[in-house]
Amino acid sequence: MKIQQFAQHVQALQIREQRNEVIASNIANADTPNYKARDIDFNAALRGAQAGQLNGQLQMTKTSAGHSDSIGVGNAGTKTEFRTTTQPSLDGNTVDTDVEQAAFAENAVQYRAALTFLNGQIRTLHLALKGSD
Amino acid sequence: MSLSKVFDIAASGMSAQSVRLNVTASNLANAGSVSGDPANVYRARQPVFSTISNGLSNRSGVAEVRLAGVIESATPIERIHQPGNPDADEEGYVYASNVKIVEEMVNMLSASSSYANGVEMINTTKDLLLQTLSLGR
């Protein structure tokens, strides 16, 4: 198992964290006039983060041949987009609280999923190192 | 730690909503008040929210809520003939506040459910953070 396999889940966690923030902002601003709801396209953001890693943008400098590649930490690929609204209100606010609550819950579950994958990989490594439970 | 920013965002929303609840409470408490002078009548108040946005937060989508101010309702005040009222003016008229009780009740429900949303966000995020802290155990 390569340490790089952690990278994907770490990147997923980071994007989920950011999406959590963005959706929290939407819910907090549900009654703010002229606030426009935003969201992060998770798949595009993950592709962006992985591309950034492949391009070497997020690599640490290696000063010895023994150093392994750094796993991608950073958020180069994340950008927010305005949500297409179904029922904008008169005060210019485009937050649909139900949609945002659903998105928040979904994002939290996906975050937990990424944590579970990471935990599984860590446990596997532990098992390989110790040879028994 | 990016997740902990959610606490600030939710807290800003909750404090804005609690101001809204306070304003609604004073509106309801003063709903029946009358005065002999139209300048002194209680007028319904309404908080106005705005978004705290600096250059960085605009791009990242992180937006806290700020109380922009409290405005007074411009709805006309009702003039009622009540000669027996000690507050009445020379012609026997009193002026009643322009609070609409139904509007205030709706405001109260909306504010309390928005407040509850903030609490839920904090609880969920706290769970996520604690699970992240116990990663690998």
Image: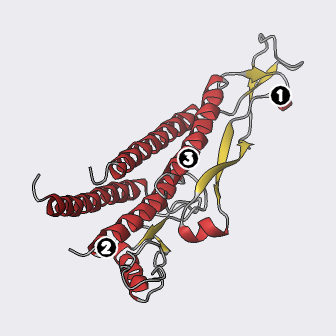
- Please name the residue shown 85% across and 25% down the image: B37
Residue in the foreground of this view, choosing between A105 and A48: A48
**Which residue is the extreme one toward the left?**
A132
User: Where is mark 1, residue-wise?
Assistant: B40
> Which chain hosts label 2?
A
- Please name the residue shown 54% across and 39% down the image: B107
| Numbered tag placed on residue A100 in the rendering | none
Question: Is label 2 or label 3 in front?
Answer: 2
Could you tell me the amino acid type at mark 2?
A: Gln
Q: Position of residue A119 (x, y in %)?
A: 24, 58
* Residue A30 shows in this picture: no
> Which chain hosts label 1?
B
Q: Position of residue B7 (x, y in %)?
A: 51, 47
Could you tell me the amino acid type at mark 3?
A: Gly
Question: Is label 1 or label 3 in front?
Answer: 3
Could you tell me the amino acid type at mark 1?
A: Asn
What crowding class fits label 2: few (fewer than 14 Cα within 10 Å), some (14-19), or many (20 or more)? some
Residue in the foreground of this view, choosing between A65 and A124: A65
User: Where is mark 2, residue-wise?
Assistant: A8
> Which chain hosts label 3?
B
